[in-house]
Image: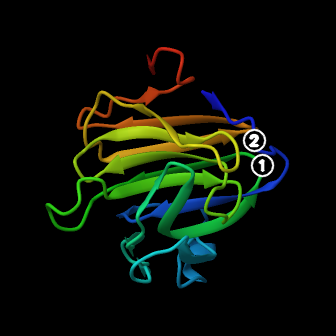
Amino acid sequence: MKKLSGLRSSAEIFIFLLIFSGGIDPLSAQETAASALGAFESHGDVGKVLHPGSVEYDAAKKSYTIAGSGENMWFGADAFQFLWQKMSGDATLTADIAFLGSGGNRHRKAVLMIRQSLDTDSVYADIALHGDGLTALQFRDEKGALTQEVQSLISAPKRLRIEKHGAYFTTSRCGFRMEMVRWRSPAVRRESS
Protein backbone atom coordinates (compact mmCIF):
# COMPACT_ATOMS: atom_id res chain seq x y z
CA MET A 1 0.00 0.00 0.00
CA LYS A 2 1.39 3.43 -0.94
CA LYS A 3 0.33 6.66 0.81
CA LEU A 4 0.46 9.88 -1.20
CA SER A 5 1.16 12.69 1.21
CA GLY A 6 0.05 15.37 -1.28
CA LEU A 7 -3.39 13.83 -1.86
CA ARG A 8 -6.24 15.45 0.02
CA SER A 9 -8.29 12.39 1.00
CA SER A 10 -11.55 14.35 1.32
CA ALA A 11 -11.21 16.16 -2.03
CA GLU A 12 -12.67 15.14 -5.37
CA ILE A 13 -10.44 12.93 -7.49
CA PHE A 14 -10.40 11.93 -11.13
CA ILE A 15 -10.50 8.28 -12.19
CA PHE A 16 -8.78 7.73 -15.53
CA LEU A 17 -8.54 5.07 -18.20
CA LEU A 18 -5.69 5.74 -20.59
CA ILE A 19 -4.89 4.34 -24.02
CA PHE A 20 -6.38 0.89 -23.67
CA SER A 21 -9.03 -1.43 -25.01
CA GLY A 22 -10.72 -3.78 -22.56
CA GLY A 23 -13.75 -4.48 -20.41
CA ILE A 24 -14.83 -2.34 -17.48
CA ASP A 25 -18.21 -1.85 -15.86
CA PRO A 26 -17.93 0.23 -12.67
CA LEU A 27 -21.51 1.58 -12.94
CA SER A 28 -24.80 -0.23 -13.40
CA ALA A 29 -25.93 -1.23 -16.90
CA GLN A 30 -28.67 1.40 -16.74
CA GLU A 31 -26.18 4.21 -15.99
CA THR A 32 -23.74 2.90 -18.61
CA ALA A 33 -26.36 2.79 -21.37
CA ALA A 34 -27.18 6.46 -20.78
CA SER A 35 -23.68 7.67 -21.76
CA ALA A 36 -21.80 7.72 -25.07
CA LEU A 37 -18.68 7.28 -22.92
CA GLY A 38 -20.05 4.36 -20.93
CA ALA A 39 -19.25 4.72 -17.25
CA PHE A 40 -17.21 7.87 -17.74
CA GLU A 41 -18.01 11.58 -17.70
CA SER A 42 -15.64 13.01 -20.30
CA HIS A 43 -12.28 12.69 -22.05
CA GLY A 44 -9.54 15.04 -23.20
CA ASP A 45 -5.84 15.75 -23.38
CA VAL A 46 -3.65 16.75 -20.43
CA GLY A 47 -0.55 18.73 -21.33
CA LYS A 48 0.87 19.34 -24.79
CA VAL A 49 0.14 16.53 -27.27
CA LEU A 50 1.11 16.16 -30.94
CA HIS A 51 -2.36 15.03 -32.10
CA PRO A 52 -5.69 15.26 -30.23
CA GLY A 53 -6.67 11.95 -28.66
CA SER A 54 -9.92 10.05 -29.17
CA VAL A 55 -12.22 7.62 -27.36
CA GLU A 56 -14.62 5.01 -28.74
CA TYR A 57 -17.03 3.10 -26.52
CA ASP A 58 -18.67 -0.16 -27.65
CA ALA A 59 -21.68 -0.64 -25.34
CA ALA A 60 -22.32 -4.20 -26.56
CA LYS A 61 -18.79 -5.31 -25.63
CA LYS A 62 -18.41 -2.86 -22.71
CA SER A 63 -15.10 -1.98 -24.38
CA TYR A 64 -13.18 1.29 -24.67
CA THR A 65 -10.59 2.11 -27.32
CA ILE A 66 -8.47 5.14 -26.44
CA ALA A 67 -5.85 6.72 -28.72
CA GLY A 68 -3.43 9.44 -27.69
CA SER A 69 -0.15 11.06 -28.64
CA GLY A 70 1.11 12.52 -25.38
CA GLU A 71 4.82 12.43 -24.61
CA ASN A 72 4.59 10.55 -21.31
CA MET A 73 3.52 10.51 -17.67
CA TRP A 74 6.89 10.91 -16.06
CA PHE A 75 9.26 13.40 -14.45
CA GLY A 76 7.40 16.50 -13.19
CA ALA A 77 4.81 17.01 -15.95
CA ASP A 78 2.51 14.76 -17.97
CA ALA A 79 1.07 14.74 -21.51
CA PHE A 80 -1.58 12.14 -22.41
CA GLN A 81 -5.16 11.46 -23.57
CA PHE A 82 -7.54 10.31 -20.88
CA LEU A 83 -11.06 9.13 -20.21
CA TRP A 84 -12.25 10.22 -16.77
CA GLN A 85 -14.91 10.24 -14.09
CA LYS A 86 -14.83 12.75 -11.22
CA MET A 87 -15.40 11.09 -7.83
CA SER A 88 -14.77 11.56 -4.14
CA GLY A 89 -13.95 9.04 -1.42
CA ASP A 90 -12.64 5.52 -1.92
CA ALA A 91 -12.55 3.97 -5.40
CA THR A 92 -11.58 0.78 -7.25
CA LEU A 93 -10.91 0.45 -10.96
CA THR A 94 -10.26 -2.87 -12.74
CA ALA A 95 -9.78 -3.45 -16.47
CA ASP A 96 -8.72 -6.12 -18.93
CA ILE A 97 -6.02 -4.59 -21.13
CA ALA A 98 -5.03 -5.14 -24.78
CA PHE A 99 -2.90 -2.93 -27.04
CA LEU A 100 -4.10 -2.56 -30.63
CA GLY A 101 -1.43 -3.73 -33.05
CA SER A 102 2.08 -4.88 -32.27
CA GLY A 103 5.34 -3.02 -32.17
CA GLY A 104 5.26 0.74 -31.85
CA ASN A 105 6.80 2.71 -29.01
CA ARG A 106 7.88 0.39 -26.19
CA HIS A 107 6.96 3.14 -23.71
CA ARG A 108 3.33 3.47 -24.85
CA LYS A 109 1.14 2.86 -21.83
CA ALA A 110 -2.23 1.52 -20.83
CA VAL A 111 -2.92 3.05 -17.42
CA LEU A 112 -5.50 2.96 -14.66
CA MET A 113 -4.98 6.19 -12.74
CA ILE A 114 -6.36 8.09 -9.77
CA ARG A 115 -5.35 11.73 -10.02
CA GLN A 116 -5.87 14.80 -7.84
CA SER A 117 -6.51 17.24 -10.73
CA LEU A 118 -6.17 17.81 -14.46
CA ASP A 119 -2.97 19.84 -13.96
CA THR A 120 0.04 18.44 -15.84
CA ASP A 121 2.01 18.15 -12.58
CA SER A 122 -0.81 16.75 -10.40
CA VAL A 123 -0.42 14.26 -7.55
CA TYR A 124 -1.40 10.79 -8.84
CA ALA A 125 -1.03 7.05 -8.51
CA ASP A 126 -1.48 4.55 -11.33
CA ILE A 127 -0.80 1.04 -12.49
CA ALA A 128 0.77 1.18 -15.94
CA LEU A 129 1.29 -1.50 -18.56
CA HIS A 130 3.94 -0.47 -21.10
CA GLY A 131 4.04 -1.57 -24.74
CA ASP A 132 7.03 -3.83 -24.00
CA GLY A 133 5.15 -5.61 -21.16
CA LEU A 134 6.73 -3.74 -18.23
CA THR A 135 4.12 -3.24 -15.48
CA ALA A 136 4.62 -0.74 -12.67
CA LEU A 137 2.98 1.20 -9.89
CA GLN A 138 3.78 4.85 -10.75
CA PHE A 139 3.09 7.81 -8.49
CA ARG A 140 3.80 11.49 -7.87
CA ASP A 141 3.74 12.25 -4.13
CA GLU A 142 3.52 16.04 -4.34
CA LYS A 143 2.37 18.54 -6.99
CA GLY A 144 5.30 19.18 -9.35
CA ALA A 145 7.43 16.36 -7.90
CA LEU A 146 9.13 13.73 -10.05
CA THR A 147 7.25 10.52 -10.86
CA GLN A 148 8.46 7.41 -9.03
CA GLU A 149 7.74 3.74 -9.74
CA VAL A 150 7.85 0.22 -8.40
CA GLN A 151 8.29 -2.33 -11.20
CA SER A 152 6.51 -5.68 -11.22
CA LEU A 153 8.33 -8.94 -11.87
CA ILE A 154 5.43 -10.22 -14.00
CA SER A 155 5.37 -8.99 -17.61
CA ALA A 156 2.32 -8.13 -19.72
CA PRO A 157 -0.59 -9.03 -17.41
CA LYS A 158 -4.05 -9.09 -18.98
CA ARG A 159 -5.88 -7.46 -16.04
CA LEU A 160 -4.94 -4.43 -13.93
CA ARG A 161 -6.53 -3.00 -10.78
CA ILE A 162 -6.01 0.09 -8.62
CA GLU A 163 -7.75 0.81 -5.31
CA LYS A 164 -7.87 4.06 -3.31
CA HIS A 165 -8.62 3.97 0.42
CA GLY A 166 -8.22 7.48 1.86
CA ALA A 167 -4.73 8.59 0.77
CA TYR A 168 -3.51 4.97 0.36
CA PHE A 169 -3.27 3.04 -2.92
CA THR A 170 -3.05 -0.66 -3.72
CA THR A 171 -2.43 -2.03 -7.20
CA SER A 172 -2.88 -5.56 -8.54
CA ARG A 173 -2.27 -7.31 -11.82
CA CYS A 174 -3.19 -10.71 -13.17
CA GLY A 175 -1.02 -12.76 -15.45
CA PHE A 176 -2.08 -15.86 -17.32
CA ARG A 177 -2.29 -17.76 -14.01
CA MET A 178 -4.44 -15.00 -12.47
CA GLU A 179 -1.81 -14.41 -9.79
CA MET A 180 -2.71 -11.30 -7.80
CA VAL A 181 0.03 -9.20 -6.26
CA ARG A 182 -0.47 -6.11 -4.10
CA TRP A 183 2.12 -3.45 -3.46
CA ARG A 184 1.97 -2.30 0.13
CA SER A 185 4.64 0.38 -0.26
CA PRO A 186 7.62 0.99 -2.53
CA ALA A 187 9.89 0.25 0.44
CA VAL A 188 8.10 -2.94 1.53
CA ARG A 189 8.24 -6.38 -0.12
CA ARG A 190 5.42 -7.48 -2.43
CA GLU A 191 2.83 -9.90 -1.06
CA SER A 192 0.80 -12.47 -2.99
CA SER A 193 -2.85 -12.76 -2.05
Q: Where is residue 5 in the image (x, y as percent from the top left)?
A: 74, 35
Eyeballing the image, is 135 above or below 58?
above
Kind of residue sitting beneath label 2: Gly
Eyeballing the image, is 172 above or below 63?
above
Q: Earlier in the sequence, mark 1 or mark 2?
A: 2
Which residue in the protein does label 1 denote?
Answer: 89
- Residue 97: name its quadrant: bottom left
| 126 lies left or right of 60 | right
| Element under disc 2 | loop
| Element under disc 1 | loop
Residue at screen point 36% across, 56% down: 109
Kind of residue sitting beneath label 1: Gly
Which residue in the protein does label 2 denote?
Answer: 6
Note whether residue 13 is visible.
yes
Q: Where is residue 140 in the image (x, y as percent from the top left)?
A: 60, 43
Between residue 153 and residue 5, name the one nearer to us. 5
Eyeballing the image, is 59 above or below 13?
below
Between residue 47 and residue 108, name the one nearer to us. 47
